[in-house]
Image (spheres, rainbow, N blue to C red):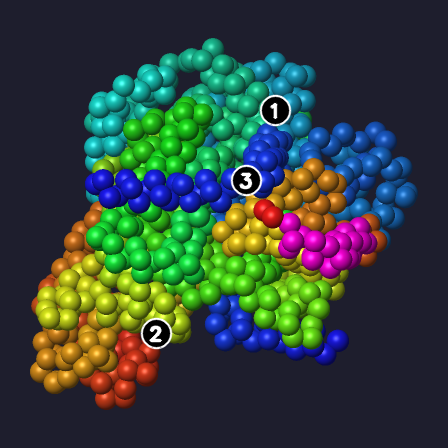
Amino acid sequence: MGTIVAIASREVKRLRHGFGGSSRPLVMGVLVGALLISYLAFRQGFVLTRGIYRVGVAPDGPRIQDDRFLSSVISPPRGYEMVSDGSVDLYVDGEHVTVGDKERSRNAAGALKRSLERQELSRISSEYALDLAFPLRIEVNYLPSPLEGAGVTTGPSLAELVRAFGETEAEPGADRAESPPGGTGQAGPDTSRATSRTDAAVREQLSEMQSGTGGGLGEIEMEFAADKEIIIPSLMQPPIPFAQVIVAFFYVLPVCFISVFFTSSFMTEKTDRRIGVLLSAPVTPVQIIIGKMLPYISFSLLSVTVITILMKGNLPLALAIFLPVVLFIFSVYLIVPLLYRTFRDTTFMSMAAVSAITGYLVFPALFSGINDFAYMSPLTLAVKMYRDEPFGLREYLFATAPMAMLFFLSMYFATRMLNEEYLMGFRSLYRKILDAIYLALNRSRPYLSVTLLSLASLPLVYMIQLVILALATNIPFAYALGALLLAGATVEEAAKSVGIVTLIENRIVDSTRQILALSLLSSLGFLIGEKALLFLSLSVVSESDLSKAVLSSGGVLVPLAAHFAFTSLACLLTRRIGTRHYPLAILASSVAHGAYNLVILGVLA
Amino acid sequence: MTPFLAMVRRELRSVLHEKTIMIAVLIQLFLASFSSIIIMGLVSYYDPESIGLNALTSIRAGVIGDTGTALARYLEAANVQPTIFASPDAAEYAFRTGRIDTIVHLPDEESGIVDMQLYLPESESRSTVILMMLQRPLKEYENHLREKRGVHVRYTDIAGKPSTSYEFLYSSIIPILMFFPAFVAGSMAVDSVAEELEHHTLDTLWSAPVSLTSIFGSKVAAALVLAVIQCIAWIGLLRVNRIHLEHRGLVLLLAVLVAGILSVAAAFIASYFKDRERSQFMYSLFMLIATGVSYFLDSSPISLMTRLATGDYYTGIANLTGYLALMVGLLVLFLTQTRRLIGLKS
């Protein structure tokens, strides 16, 4: 423990030293400037669509109150001319709107329609009594879903669990009373008139519409998504969680920003040739890594805390959600500098990491509420937290468990890679990855190592497959299935065989019997992990046929035999054609595996 | 000039050799395919009709109440099959047995305030989808009720396309895709300048008959060449995906100018700080500031890109001259001041 703290304080000292001296005022000034500017831009509600359409309005036409339109008053004959020569997209003459024939003009018309509809609502609400302007009020009630297992929020609500623990403020919890009546369905709708109550709802939603800029970024506080049990059709806002996703993204941003120092930390040790000295000292690689990571993880958790307090969120819950996320981000940034050969390498790999991480975290969260796949990202949980909606322990584990597991996996790999010979070598990236896997195996106990490697690689395989799955939802089902099965099979085959192949390459194993035994063990390890994860994921993502196709395969013996067959195919083939052509062997076994999956699904039979 | 070109080639070769550029391209493909997911997400929230949600899924609604006829007509038009039930009990039974997805309970009268009851399944994703599909027919029914009360809502019949995905594509995705190579170019410039300074290889290069200007100029030029190639590839890919860019040449020019400005600025930063760690950090901060400041300008690179790509009538080459001047100015300043900058202690 003392050693870890010593390494951590050495790391902090290194940072302080880097930004000390004559450059400090400059750095501080720039940092403050950056914060100020981003704050100002955020206050303005960062609208990128400002002024993208041009519209001409007749002198007696409506005033267009929408940032997207640059409008000018033009008298009729000239206005129609300008529409036809394309210098304005639209021309509004009284109640009549003329639309240009370009793509942007047609979209401008769609945008104007929405915008004027809103203005019209404001107009009629001021010109007419409320019961005439908004004659339809809809009260929403919830009934238990008829299909079993379709519900998402059947488990214990984690928010409630944490709340029961915590001493957090009572205000967000107070208005949770109108959550769906979870009780037995008494569908006998009671038709008591509650006019005053619905009037209040109309006024509230009306003022919300008038204050909002349309995108919904203006209101970030929790009221934004408060339960609206009274719906006024024309005032209905799309339930887009944009504002919450942006808030959730703020959590990730500082972590990505400081990561450059963490990655550099290993690199400078390497360029200054100090890593050898450090490694020869009586400290273990684990201590070095944890020590170096400690300041950054502490900073990240601090920033999570600060953001949560500023945004008035639930602190224990936020920490529970973001700790795995922070660990996940650092597990990626831990591997990057260890694989690095040149500066550019690190930059590009970090960039790849940033975009993959943000993609993985942010995009699924946009779908929260409409697709259960949203739960693959923990940010969805944060969105739920800020909307004051409950989620269960299963959803929490579905989102965070693979991340936590990945962290431990990469920690283990990093401890094996942290040796002078490996770090100083300049080899191709592919080579470096294979070497890292070889280092991770215990050469004196190849059988156990291979089994555990397959088991441990599952979170990674699983995350990659989820990404593939998410990407494939874009393509029509028929094409998606084929591509998906092949891509999914490739990832699996690579994960199962790569350990064995490095053993073959380094002549630890050679005989066919050994390879077959290793293939069997590798398949077994993989299958155990697969079944465990399957149990978790199917309970959350039950609705998608695609997910069943990828993640499940029924039974135990048949899939084990299949896994064994494909893995031994890949490994034996690699021995035959040489490890240089290992990707070819993977391709062969993946095609076989994909075909097998199709047969199982009954497509090819 | 020849040693300059030789050095540009050397830079490019090292990038190709390390295959790092492949990673960069991979990232961008990743971003692009994810961005189509965002578009789908946005559209399914804002314009469920435009992706044919109503055509893909049909839902069955139970309607209780006699006055349902006007509503039933709107529901049918939106691909929601209405079934009329006489009593709540019958409707609830149908819901329980899975024959209908939602229940709409209308009061007996259409006069006064119409208090409707809507019953949705508890499953969140189901009820959201149902609500999104019901939105349009309910709005139409609301307008129908308004007309009956003598309230006329104008502009309900403008014929236009739902604009959400168009706006998102041209105001966010295309600027991101076209400026990402510029961002990469800046990062590359930081790295290659910092690497020479940190490894003290500059002294060796210096002893060869090349000027400092051409050493650093070649680094910026190499970064720029890669940015140009990536931008061209992007424009091609967008075309394959049937996303049309107006003023393609100017779009490319703007992207290249921004790449130029960023790489020169990045080289500036790296020459002053002289190590990768601090330079990259300051470069990221600089990017943040530049984006923030440009947001407050009327013709920021992002909005200029949007206007060029959507074919704004009044936007053309004249709008780019400012950026051209900025790039040339920065370049001259950098090339004349490098020696002093490197001499400064950071």
User: Considering only vertical position in the picture, is A587 above or below A239?
Assistant: below
Question: Between tags 1 and 3, which lies in front?
Answer: 3
Disc 2: which residue: A431
Q: Is mark 1 on a helix, strand or loop?
A: helix
Q: Mark 1 lies on which chain?
A: A
| Residue A420 lies in quadrant | bottom left
| Residue at the top extreme of this rendering | A196
Magenta-drawn segment: B321-344
Chain bearing tag 3 is A
Marks 2, 1 in one chain:
yes
Residue A529 can be seen in this image: yes
Q: How far apart are marks 2 and 1 (CA)?
A: 60 Å
Spatial separation of the CA atoms under disc 1 and disc 3: 52 Å
Q: Decide whether residue B324 is among the magenta residues.
A: yes
Q: Where on the picture, by quarter, is residue B183? A: bottom right
Disc 2 with disc 3 on a shared chain: yes
Q: In this view, does B313 lie to the left or right of B103?
A: right
Q: Which residue is drawn at 65% across and 44% down?
A: B290
* Mark identifier at residue A21: 3
